[in-house]
Each structure stands twice: as C-alpha cells, then as structure tokens.
Image (cartoon, rainbow, N blue to C red):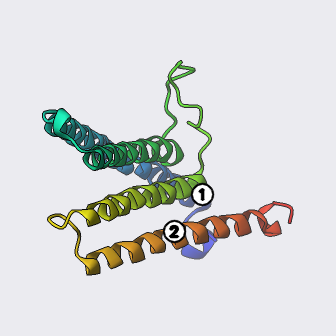
C-alpha cells in the first residue's frame, strides 16, 4: 500500500507511526471536558447547599408534602452528581488514561470495570431516575392549585419519561444482542 503512494517503505512507516501517535495523543483533548464536569459537580454541590439552607431555615413550618418535595430535590441533585462522577471516572479511564490511585481504601469497587456499554446503561438509568423524580415532584404539586403544573406540560413530561424508559430498554436490548453475536467472539 505504501508503495502505491510513491513513498519509500521506511518513510511511509515513519509517517504512519507519527500519525498514529498524534491520533493516540488526541485522547487528551477529552481531559478538559472531564475537568469541566468536575466544575459541574461543584455547581450541583452549591445548588444542594442552597436548597438545604433555604428549606431548613423554615424547617419547622414544612408540611409533609413540602418535606417530601425537599427530599426529592436533594435526591435529584445527588443522582445528578453521582451520574457526573461515574461519567468522569469511567470516561476518563476508558478514553484518556488509567487513574493511578493504586488500591486506595476509598477506590470505588466498580472503577476500572465499567466499559462503554455499561456506561451507556448507567447514564440512561440515571436519566430515567432523575426524570422520574422530577415527574413525581410534579405529581405531588397537583394538590396545590397555586403551583400545579400545566396539564400540557405534565403530559409532555410523561411522554419524555416514557421515551427515556423505552430508550433505556432498547439500549439494553441492543447490548444484549451484540454480546450474543458469535462474530464478536461470544457464544450464542
């Protein structure tokens, strides 16, 4: 193939090696994206703290429903933060470089074991959970005419939730089918 372009074989191999090193080094272009996601975790932490401060300032006045709504908001923020950390750790390890943290006692058990298929499923499962919590919050607000969501908006939220669920099921099904494909080295 190299002879076809008219280059000596050694020169062509050198060019190919340099190009492949450039491609391999390009993975580091993703590192700033993961750093920005860390900043997003900080933003979630700030929102979490603000939510606690705002609501706990009148803790004794909270009704049961308001306490449930507060809990759902905090769970929602927590799930979003967890999702970001999973994407940061698994994405960085899968596409950029291994994390050199050794056998640190706080090293998550799943670290280094999540491949791209697992990451996709974790992301969609988290999105479904976050969306479900948002939908549940909206349903809880139906009892309060002052803050009840618009019925059309609520319908769209249900449609979007179902779309996320169906997408997750289809992704899981596609991954299951692909792992059973004998051409990928798996037994049917």
Residue at figure coordinates x 34%, y 59% from the top left: 134
Helix, strand or loop at disc 2? helix
At 42% from the left and 60% from the top, the residue drawn is 132
Is residue 70 positioned above or below 101 on the image? below
Q: Secondary structure at mark 1?
A: helix
Residue 117's disc number: 1
For disc 2, the marked residue is 165
- Residue 170, position in %: x, y? 60, 72
Residue at point 44% right, 48% down? 87
Side of 81 relative to 2 (left or right): left
Q: Nearer the viewer, residue 124 or 17?
A: 124
Q: CA distance from mark 2 to mark 1?
A: 17 Å
Closer to the observer: label 2 or label 1? 2
The residue closer to the viewer here, 89 or 94, is 89
Regarding residue 105, the answer to whether it shows in the image is yes
Badge 2, how many Cα within 10 Å: few under 14, some, many 20+?
some
From the viewer's perspective, tell me whether residue 9 is left or right of residue 106. Answer: right
Does residue 180 sit above or below 159 in this rendering?
above
Whole-percent x, y for residue 27 in the image? 43, 50
Position of residue 155 in the picture relative to residue 114 (left or right): left
Q: Are marks 2 and 1 in contact (CB under 8 Å)?
A: no
Front position in the image: 16 or 46: 46
Q: Position of residue 68 (x, y in %)?
A: 33, 46
Q: Which quadrant of the figure contains the C terminus?
A: bottom right
121 relative to 69 in the view: left or right: right
Residue 74: percent from the left, percent from the top?
A: 31, 43
């Amino acid at each position: 193939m190299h002879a076809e372009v008219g280059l000596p074989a050694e020169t062509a191999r050198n060019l190919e090696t340099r190009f492949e090193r450039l491609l391999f080094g390009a993975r580091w272009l993703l590192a700033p994206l993961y750093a920005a996601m860390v900043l997003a975790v900080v933003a979630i932490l700030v929102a979490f703290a603000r939510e606690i401060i705002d609501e706990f300032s009148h803790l004794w006045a909270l009704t049961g429903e308001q306490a449930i709504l507060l809990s759902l908001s905090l769970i929602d923020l927590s799930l979003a933060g967890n999702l970001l950390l999973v994407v940061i750790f698994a994405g960085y390890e899968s596409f950029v470089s291994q994390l050199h943290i050794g056998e640190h006692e706080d090293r998550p058990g799943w670290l280094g074991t999540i491949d791209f298929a697992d990451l996709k499923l974790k992301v969609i499962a988290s999105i479904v959970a976050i969306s479900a919590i948002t939908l549940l919050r909206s349903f809880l607000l139906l009892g309060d005419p002052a803050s009840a969501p618009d019925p059309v908006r609520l319908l769209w939220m249900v449609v979007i939730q179902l779309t996320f669920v169906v997408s997750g099921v289809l992704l899981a099904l596609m991954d299951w089918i692909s792992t059973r494909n004998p051409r990928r080295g798996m037994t049917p």
